[in-house]
């Protein structure tokens, strides 16, 4: 920068936090601000009722629903890629015992990269092969990591199980009842993609430099951890644990709002008329509450929803109800965000494939607000300095 006079740049349009900015095109997913969500044109409500996660992952990656045979082959390919290299298991043993599972997952993604023979091949077919490996290995990183942290050995793979059943089995050695597997499948479908959310955008920015898919997914995983994004489902549970009973919910919320606190599980950058996923997750929470004899969580959440609507006109997001659902499914709260990642990795990978199939570097401008140009002065030096 010199001090000579230059014509100032015209002041560009600026939207803090990129709110409302269209940062790219996608054929994968549409978030409708009026409480809708579609995966490649299919309504999420219909998918949640009728599809399974493997079908949704296939759709996101390949653009069309699979035939029965294609789904079978894709499910088998996923199951065959679940096992981790022994070096990655060893790395997880070396991490401090207090490592958060999201940090373990992020480190796992990064370490898996050099083991992938297609790492630096960004062709469409190689990217699909890497996507299958990344989706398959995510639940293994989570479950094996969790067992290792608690002094237990990872369990052998059960390739006949689909991802939802396999996650339960790999964590505790038991294959759950069918209804539980179906519920988990629905949760995975709800979380699988959400167009240019922060973690997916991070993945696309990384992929747009032509860095590899593992680099992109590592960026995405780091981004998902934050409580304003995926980390909200762990934080929401702390809030619900603190409230404890429905009769305390309204006063808890009023106190928190008076302190200008951010209430986890509420608000959304795009949805202004409700989060499309909330009604399904609320019903799962209600159903699960009846089955496990814990029917207080939904009334607590509903009381919070009514108070927030009255006070700030803000809607609940999916993480409010996901938190008690994960608790009732007996997952420890620190696994809430990794479970979100186990599903969203399908979306991240689909977006990386799309980005690199039609790539252009993502490089926005910033609005400079620092000092005006000024002359450099050589620092005066004292003797002996
Ligand atoms: C999701 C989120 C980051 C969106 O942020 P955003 O689009 O930048 O919205 P803003 O933070 O500008 O919020 C607009 C207004 O609503 C308020 N608001 C938004 N979410 C709020 C929340 N969860 N609790 C309290 N107030 C909230 C803001 O304080 C702001 O009020 P103001 O205009 O009086 O200052 C935000 O709603 C949030 O932090 N939610 C909690 C975390 C969460 O649940 N994340 C998961 C998202 S799926």
Image (tube, helix red, strand yellow):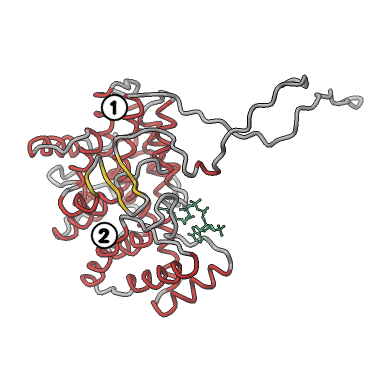
Depth check: 326 or 10 in front? 10
C-alpha distance separating marks 2 and 1: 32 Å
Q: Earlier in the sequence, mark 2 or mark 1?
A: 1
Q: Which residue lies furthest to the left in this view?
A: 69
Q: In this view, does 177 lie to the left or right of 87?
A: left
Query: In the rendered image, which residue does mark 1 sit on?
Result: 127
Depth check: 144 or 196 in front? 196
Q: Which residue lies furthest to the right in this view?
A: 383
Pair 2/1: label in front: 2
What residue lies at 36% left-to-right and 70% top-to-bottom?
302
Disc 1 is placed on an element classified as helix
What residue lies at 29% left-to-right and 60% top-to-bottom?
281
Give above or below for 332 relative to 164. below
Q: Does the residue labelled 2 lie within 8 Å of ligand 1?
A: no
Query: In the rendered image, which residue does mark 2 sit on?
Result: 280
Quadrant where the image shows the C terminus:
top right
Depth check: 359 or 71 in front? 359
Disc 2 is placed on an element classified as helix
Image location (x, y in percent) of residue 294: 28, 73
What residue lies at 43% left-to-right and 43% top-to-bottom?
198
What residue lies at 46% left-to-right and 75% top-to-bottom?
250
Q: Bin the neighbour count of mark 1 within 10 Å (Cα to Cα): few under 14, some 14-19, many 20 and up.
A: many
Image location (x, y in percent) of residue 344: 32, 44
The image quarter in which residue 135 lies: top left
Q: Is residue 353 left or right of residue 374?
A: left
Q: Does the residue labelled 1 lie within 8 Å of ligand 1?
A: no
């Amino acid at each position: 920068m010199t001090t000579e006079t230059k014509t100032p740049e015209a002041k560009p349009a600026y939207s803090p936090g990129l709110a409302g900015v269209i940062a790219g095109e996608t054929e994968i997913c549409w978030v409708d601000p009026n409480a809708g969500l579609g995966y490649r044109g299919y309504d999420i409500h219909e998918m949640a009722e009728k599809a399974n996660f493997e079908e949704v992952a296939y759709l996101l990656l390949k653009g069309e629903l699979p035939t029965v045979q294609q789904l079978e082959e894709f499910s088998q390919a996923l199951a065959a890629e679940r096992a981790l290299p022994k070096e990655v298991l060893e790395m997880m043993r070396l991490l401090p015992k207090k490592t958060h599972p999201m940090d373990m997952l992020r480190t796992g993604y990064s370490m898996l990269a050099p083991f992938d023979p297609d790492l630096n091949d960004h062709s469409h077919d190689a990217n699909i092969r890497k996507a299958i490996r990344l989706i398959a290995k995510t639940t293994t990183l989570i479950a094996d990591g969790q067992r290792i942290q608690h002094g237990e050995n990872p369990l052998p793979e059960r390739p006949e199980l689909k991802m939802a059943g396999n996650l339960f089995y790999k964590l505790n050695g038991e294959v759950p009842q069918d209804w539980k597997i179906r519920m988990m499948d629905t949760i995975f479908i709800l979380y699988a993609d959400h167009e240019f959310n922060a973690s997916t955008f991070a993945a696309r920015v990384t992929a747009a430099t032509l860095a590899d898919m593992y680099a992109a997914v590592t960026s995405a995983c780091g981004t998902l951890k934050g409580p304003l994004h995926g980390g909200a489902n762990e934080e929401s549970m702390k809030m619900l644990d603190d409230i404890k009973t429905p009769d305390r919910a309204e006063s808890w919320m009023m106190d928190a709002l008076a302190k200008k606190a951010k209430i986890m599980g509420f608000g959304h950058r795009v949805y202004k008329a409700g989060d499309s996923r909330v009604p399904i997750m609320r019903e799962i929470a209600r159903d699960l509450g009846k089955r496990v004899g814990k029917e207080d969580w939904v009334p607590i959440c509903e009381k919070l929803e009514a108070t927030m609507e009255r006070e700030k006109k803000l809607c609940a997001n999916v993480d409010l109800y996901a938190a008690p659902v994960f608790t009732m499914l007996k997952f420890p709260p620190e696994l809430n965000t990794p479970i979100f990642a186990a599903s969203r990795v399908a979306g991240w990978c689909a977006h990386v494939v799309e980005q690199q199939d039609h790539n252009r570097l993502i490089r926005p401008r910033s609005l400079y607000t620092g000092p005006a140009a000024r002359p450099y002065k050589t620092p005066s030096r004292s003797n002996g300095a």
